[in-house]
Image: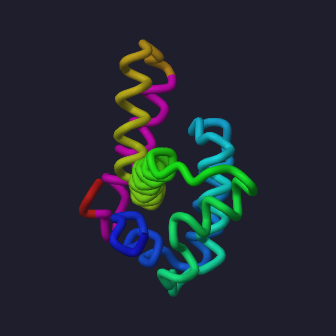
Amino acid sequence: MNRSKLIPILKSFSKEEIKEFDKFLDSPFFGCKKFVLNFYRSISEYHPEYREEDIAKEKIFKKIYEGKKFNDALVRRIISDLIRFSEEYMAYRNFRERNTFRSISLLNELRNRDLEDQFRIRSGQIIKKLNSPGPTDPEL
């Protein structure tokens, strides 16, 4: 499974991110299926090394689905889902850390929903930041 695009992504995650990604997957908001989460939890035990002998598809499958015949198509689907979820997680982390993007997204959403009072309040806060003395966030 080391040839999978998933493993380099997971290797790039810190120990904290591995735990946070588990919570991300476990959230009902993102619609991750329980069998995908179980697969992730089985391979995340081997972070950060992910040695092939530990994470071989057949071995992880047998660990999760005791007594069932190996299904390569199912494992490939799970890996594909985990790649997609990991990309969403990385995008979310980036978005969360950039207040400017969050503010712009919120203002767009308030405007789209015709919530003009809230839009004026939030945009007013941004204008105050822009007009305040001292250094201004260049992204703002």
Please state, as top left, top right, bottom left or bottom right, where the N terminus lies in the image. Answer: bottom left
The quadrant in which residue 45 appears is: bottom right
Q: Which residue ends up furthest to the right in the rendered image?
A: 66
- Name the spot of residue 9 as percent of width and height, x first: 40, 69
Residue 126, magenta (yes or no): yes
The quadrant in which residue 66 appears is: bottom right
Along the line of sight, the residue nearer the viewer: 126 or 111: 111
Q: Which residue corresponds to the image point at 47% horizontal and 59% vertical from the top-left?
A: 93
Task: Specify the segment rendered in magenta.
Answer: 118-137
Q: Which residue corresponds to the image point at 61% horizontal and 65% vertical from the top-left?
A: 60
Please say if 41 is above or below 85.
below
Q: Which residue corresponds to the image point at 41% horizontal and 50% vertical from the top-left?
A: 80
Q: Main secondary structure of the magenta part?
A: helix
Along the line of sight, the residue nearer the viewer: 123 or 73: 73
Residue 44 is left or right of residue 121, and the answer is: right
Please state, as top left, top right, bottom left or bottom right, where the C terminus lies in the image. Answer: bottom left
The quadrant in which residue 40 appears is: bottom right
Residue 83, magenta (yes or no): no
- Name the spot of residue 53 as percent of width and height, x first: 53, 83
- Name the spot of residue 4 as percent of width and height, x first: 36, 66
Along the line of sight, the residue nearer the viewer: 49 or 112: 49
Residue 104 is left or right of residue 78, and the answer is: left
- Name the spot of residue 115 as percent of width and height, x first: 47, 17
Q: Does the rendering let one see residue 35? A: yes
Along the line of sight, the residue nearer the viewer: 92 or 80: 80
